[in-house]
Amino acid sequence: MGIKRILLKLSSHLDYPLLIMLLILMLLSLFVQYSAGNENTTHLLMQGGNLLIALIVLVLVANISPWHLLSLAVPLYVGGVLLLLGVATFGDVINGSRRWLHLGVLRIQPSEILKIAAPLMLAWYFHTREATLRLADYGIAAALLALPVLLVARQPDLGTALLIAASGFYVLFFAGLPWRLFLGSVALAGASLPLVWHFLHDYQKQRLLTLLDPTKDPLGAGYHIIQSSIAIGSGGILGEGWLQGTQAHLDFLPEHTTDFVFAVFGEEFGLLGNILLLLLYLAIILRGLILTDRAPNLFARLLSASITLSFFTYVFVNMGMVSGILPVVGVPLPMISYGGTAQLIVLLGFGMMMSANTHRMLNKS
Amino acid sequence: MKSRVELRHYHTDISDFRRRLLIVTAGVVIAFVLLIARWVDIQILHHNDYLVQAENNRISLIPITPNRGIITDRNGMVLANNYSAYTVELTPSKIANLNDTINAIAQLIPITPVDRRHFFKSLADNHHFASLPLRTHLTDEEAAKIAANVFRLPGVEVNARLFRHYPQGKVAAHLLGYVSRLNDADITKLQSAGRYDNYRGADHIGKTGIEQSYEALLHGNTGYEQVETDAGGHAVRLLAHNAPISGDKLTLWLDSRMEAIAEKAFGDHRGALVAIDVHTGGILAMVSQPGFDPNLFIDGIDSTDWDALNNSSDHPLIDRALRSAYPEGSTLKPFMALAGLHYGVRTPEQTIYDPGYFAFPGSSHHYRDWAPNGHGTVDMHKSLVVSCDTYYYHLANDLGIVRMHDFLSQFGFGRKTGIDLEGEKPGVLPSPAWKAKFSRQPWYPGETVICGIGQGYNLATPLQLAVATASLANGGMVLRPQLVKRIVDSHTGIARDLPTQVVGQVNLPPDQLKVIVDAMIDVTRPGGTAVGAFVGAPYLVAAKTGTAQVVGIRQNEKYHAADLDMTHRDHAVLIAFAPADAPKIAVAVLVENGGHGGTAAGPIARAVMDYYLLGKLPAPAPQTGGPVHGH
C-alpha cells in the first residue's frame, strides 16, 4: 500500500514523546478555546484547523533533510529581512504599528518569520564556522541578530523584537559564547537600560510603569493586568470549572481567546490546573533539552536549544504577563492561544528540531 | 587574542555545552517556580479579594423605582397619580464633551435653551446621580429617534420613567404639596436618616405638603434586579429579582369639590379657609389663596414660573392656612366669654355699660369700641351678637392675662395643632411669661385689655381657629386635625383608618356652652354681624365674625405703591359651625384685607357649608386640569 508506506516513512522522523505531549496540549487548547470562545463551534473548528495545519507542517518539516534546512537558512533570513524592510516602507499600520505586509491576497507579518529565520541563520552560521570559530564570529552573529531585532523593534513591536533577540541569543549562548562576553553584555544591557527607556514609546513606558502599580490606571494600561489577575485570582485552588468562568464570558477580560487565554484557564481550572499545565510545558521543554543534549551535531544542538528555549520564553512571558508579573507584550501562549501563525511557527520549530535530530548528517562530523 | 583560533576540544566543548544546558534548565525551573509563587499569592492568599472583585465586576444591582402612592380625596377623586413618559438621559461620566453630545441630540429632537440650562443647573446641583435627564416627555417618535441613534451617542439613554401628576391642578395645591427632583440637600437628609438606600434609582421626593409629610409611606420600597453584567455594563442575565413595593395609597378627608368651591369663593382675595369635621378632626377643606399649579414643580420649575410665584406680593407659595398667623380679632370673643363664665368673673346676665370705650380709672386713654357711640347696656349674649369690644376690655381686665392664657390655651391657641403636615406655625397666645422670653419689658395691663378682643400680640393660624371652633361645636374636644383619613397598603391591600386623636378636653359645662352657642346662632340672624352671609340657610349656623387689624402684622414686601392702601385694610375673619343643633362641620375663614368678617368671609363659609350640608353646587362646576405635557 502506497499510502501506508508514505505514512510509515513520514512517521519515522517524529519524536513521539514530544509529539504526544504536543497533542495533549492541542487537545487542551480545544477545550480552553471552546470555553473562552463562548462555546462557539465555529471558533472551535477554526482553532482545530489552525492546529491541524500546524501539525501537518510539523510532520512535513520533520521529514525534510536537515541539509535542506541548512540551505534554507540564508534565503529565509535574507528574505525575512527584506520583508521587514518592505514593512517599514509599505506596511499597513494597524493599532499604531507597522507590522503587516500585503502580498497580493496574502497579508503576512514578517516578524513572525524571523522568529524561526533568525535562530536558523545563526545556527547555520555557527555550524559552517564550527571548525574555525573565532571570537569575532560571535560579533558577526550578534550583528546578524541585531539587524532584524532592530527592524522589528522600530515597527514598533518590542515584544516580538525581544523574542527574536532571545531566540538568537540562545544560539549564541549554546555556541559557546564566552562567559566574560555573556556577563559583559548583561552588564552592558543593564547599563543601557536608562538609554533604552529614553527610546521607548510612551505606551511602552506606560506598560512598564503599569506593571509596578496597575491600579494607577485601572481603565487604561492597567486594565489588562487587573482584569487578568482578577480572573486568575478568583479561580482559587480548584477553579470554577470548565465553562464556568465568568470574567472572560462577560468580556471583562480583553483578548481572552488570544494573548490572555491563560486567564480563562486560570479562572476555570485554578491553581491545580495551572500547575498541571505548567508541568506539561516543563515536560515538553525538558524533552526538548534532552533532544538537544542528544543532538548529533552542532547545527541540531543549536537549533534544538534555541527552539526549546524560545518555546519556554513564550510560555514564561505569556504566563508572567497574564499573571501580572511581566509587562504586557503581545506574546501568545504556545498551542493554547487562538491563532494560526503563532501555532504554525511553534510547530514548525519543533518539526525542524525533529528533522535535525532524526536524520543522520552523513557528510559532516 | 581576538584573532586567535578557538581551541576546539570535543570533550570540553560538550561538557561546556552540558553545563550550559543544566544552567538553562535550572533557569527554566526557577522561572516556573516564580510563576507558581505568583499563583499561590493570587489564587490562595488573595483569592477572596479577587473573588470579591470578580463578583463586583460581574454582578450589579439595578434599582427598580417603586410606584409612588396615589392620593385621592374622600370620594375617590384622584389628587395625585403617576404616568409613564420617555426621557432622554445623559450620563456625564461617559461623555467626553457634553455640549457636543447635546448638540448631536438637538439634531434629532428639539432641545430648547431652557432644556440646556435646566440640565447644566441640575448637573451643578446634583452630584449623586449617574445620569440626568436632558428632556422629559418625549413623544414616541422622538424616543424612537434617540433610541435608534444611541449607538453613536455613548452615555445617552432613553428611559421610560414615572412622573407624578396632579390632575386637579391648583386645587388643594398647598396641602398636597409636590414632588420634585432630589437634590443634594434631600440626599444628605435621607442619608442621615438611614433611608437613602431606599432611594437608589429614585429621582423625585416629596418637597412640601402631604407629599412631604407622608413621603415615607408614599415612596414605597425600592426593588432590585440583581443582574450579571458584561464589561460594557449590559445586563446579560437576571440573577435575582426583588420586586419593588408601591407606596401606600392615601385617602384624604378632603372633599376636592368642596375645596374647589371654597377656592373659587375667594375670588381675587388672598386668604385661607379651613373646614374640619367636628367629630374626627378630619380636614374637609383647607384653602390658601392664591394658589399655584404643583405640576410646575415636578420636573424642576422653570425660572420664569418660579420668579412669578416667588416674587409675587401675594405669596402664592405660602400655605396661609398653616403658616400665616393672624390676630383672631373678635372671633376670640366666644372663647373669652367662656373664660369669664369658667372663672366666675361674669354671669350670662351680668351687664356692663358701653359708652363706646374702656378706660382705666384715672387714665384718659380710651380703648375704643368699634361702634363710636357704644352699645349701651350689654350682657354676654349681646356682647357676642353685636361684637361689643368694651365688654371684652372689661372682661379681660377682670380676668387678667394669666387666666386668659391658661383658659384659651386649652383650645390649642399658641400651640401647633399637630396636623399631618410640616411647617405649621404655632401662632401666639400671649402671657407675661411669653413676653419675658422675647423682651425685657414687663407685661402692661393695657396689653391685657386689647388681647381681650383678639388683638395685640394674639396670633392664630386659620387652622388653629378651625380646631378651636370645632371644639366649641363638639362640646370641648380638642382634636388633632388630620388630612389623611385612610392608608391603603398597596402590597397587601389592607386599609387602615387613622384613628381620631383627641389632644385635649376643655371642661365646658353645657349650660355655659349653650349661652355662647345661642349667641353665635344669633350672630347669623337679623341683628347679628353675619346675617348677610347666612340669611335663608336651611340649617342652623353658629358663627362669630371678626376683623383683624393689619397694624402690627409683619409685611415682607410693600413695593407696590398702589397696594399700600389695600394691604393696610383689616383682615376679615369668621368662625362658624353647622348645623348648630347637631354640628358636623366647623369652618374658619380669613380674607386678607377683606374688611369686615361677616361680609367678606361669611359668603365663603356659606358656600362651603351649603355644599357640605346640602350637596349644593355653585355653578359652574370646578375646573380640572388634564395631564401636563411639557414642551
Image (cartoon, rainbow, N blue to C red):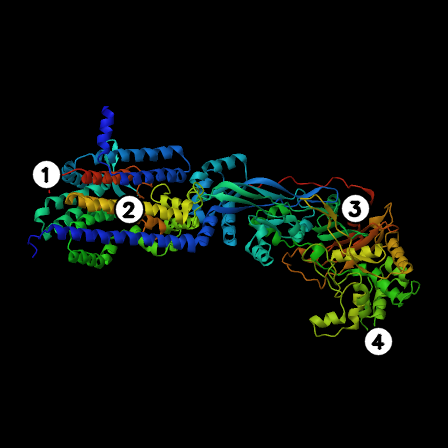
Tags 3 and 2 touching, CB below 8 Å:
no
Residue B561, compared with residue A314, is above or below; it is below
**Which disc number belongs to residue B599?**
none
Q: Chain of mark 1?
A: A
Q: Position of residue B529 (x, y in %)?
A: 84, 55
Name the kind of residue labelled 1 in the image: Asn
Tags 4 and 1 touching, CB below 8 Å:
no
Name the kind of residue labelled 3 in the image: Ala
Q: Position of residue B223 (x, y in %)?
A: 59, 46
Q: Which residue is mark 1?
A: A363
Asked if residue A57 lies left or right of residue A43, the reply is left
Q: Residue at x 64, y 59 (%)?
A: B557
Query: Which secondary structure lies at badge 3?
Result: helix
Q: Which residue is mark 4?
A: B362
Q: Chain of mark 3?
A: B
Q: Is residue B236 visible?
A: yes
Q: Which residue is mark 2?
A: A314
Number of labelled discs?
Answer: 4
Tags 3 and 1 touching, CB below 8 Å:
no
Q: Position of residue B460 (x, y in %)?
A: 75, 60
Q: Position of residue B488 (x, y in %)?
A: 71, 45
Question: Are marks 2 and 4 in one subunit?
Answer: no
Query: Which secondary structure lies at badge 2?
Result: helix
Tags 2 and 4 touching, CB below 8 Å:
no
Question: Are marks 3 and 2 in one subunit?
Answer: no
- Return the disc, 1 or 2, that comes first in the chain's sequence: 2
Give the spatial CA distance, label 3 vs label 4.
49 Å
Name the kind of residue labelled 2 in the image: Tyr
- Locate the C terminus of chain B by quadrant: top right
Tell me the mark number nearer the camera, choosing from 4 and 1: 1
Query: Which secondary structure lies at badge 1?
Result: loop
